[in-house]
Amino acid sequence: MTTRSVRTRSLVREPEITPSILASIPECLRDALKEAINTRGRGRKSVLISSNSLTNRFIFSRWGIRPSQRRRYKNLFASVRKQSRVVFQHFLLRGRVEWTEDSERHVFGVYKFDEIRGNLILGFVAMTPESEWTLSKR
């Protein structure tokens, strides 16, 4: 008697991606920069963040899906990765990221560190009110 096990693949429903969800990616970037402000060591002038790491962070914080599950949620990761690159290109063209929180103004200069196979890596430099005048107003 031959018993053949049939391997069935469970169908996993990917979370729905709406424009309003994708619009919250810059908030995730701001959270990463706030975290960098709080943990910044002495002598550390800039923070490097890649578009892929922002994607992983966003998806994990939003849906609890880990980067190791990329194959299972291929379309989700691809869509968010594409939007993260668009967000990064926007801030790179502006040359700055700024927001006000609790009457405190945060300003970061932005520069391109590297780009490897579509993964855009940006450097963010915290600017003080005294040095802000050196930042271009693109």
Image: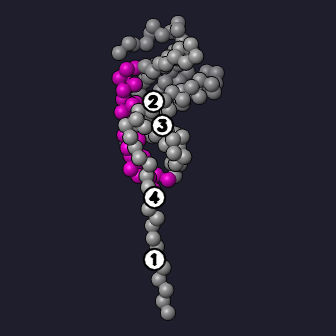
Q: Secondary structure at mark 1?
A: loop
Residue 61 x, y percent position in the rendering: 54, 40
**Residue behind mark 2:** 26
Q: Is residue 119 above or below residue 113?
A: below
**Residue behind mark 3:** 54
Which label's residue is closer to the chain start, 4 or 3? Answer: 4
Region of the chain picked out in magenta, as a range: 69-95
Q: Which residue is most to the bottom?
A: 1
The mark closer to the camera, 3 or 1, is: 1
Q: Secondary structure at mark 3?
A: helix
The residues bearing labels 4 and 3 have C-alpha atoms spaced at a distance of 23 Å
**Residue behind mark 4:** 12
The residues bearing labels 3 and 1 have C-alpha atoms spaced at a distance of 38 Å
The residues bearing labels 1 and 4 have C-alpha atoms spaced at a distance of 18 Å
The mark closer to the camera, 1 or 4, is: 4
The residues bearing labels 1 and 2 have C-alpha atoms spaced at a distance of 45 Å
Whether residue 116 appears in this view of the structure is: no
Residue 36 x, y percent position in the rendering: 58, 27
Which label's residue is closer to the chain start, 1 or 2? Answer: 1
Q: Secondary structure at mark 2?
A: helix
The mark closer to the camera, 2 or 4, is: 4
Which label's residue is closer to the chain start, 2 or 3? Answer: 2
Residue occupying the point 52% across, 48% down: 65
The residues bearing labels 2 and 4 have C-alpha atoms spaced at a distance of 27 Å
Tell me the amino acid under the disc marked 1. Val
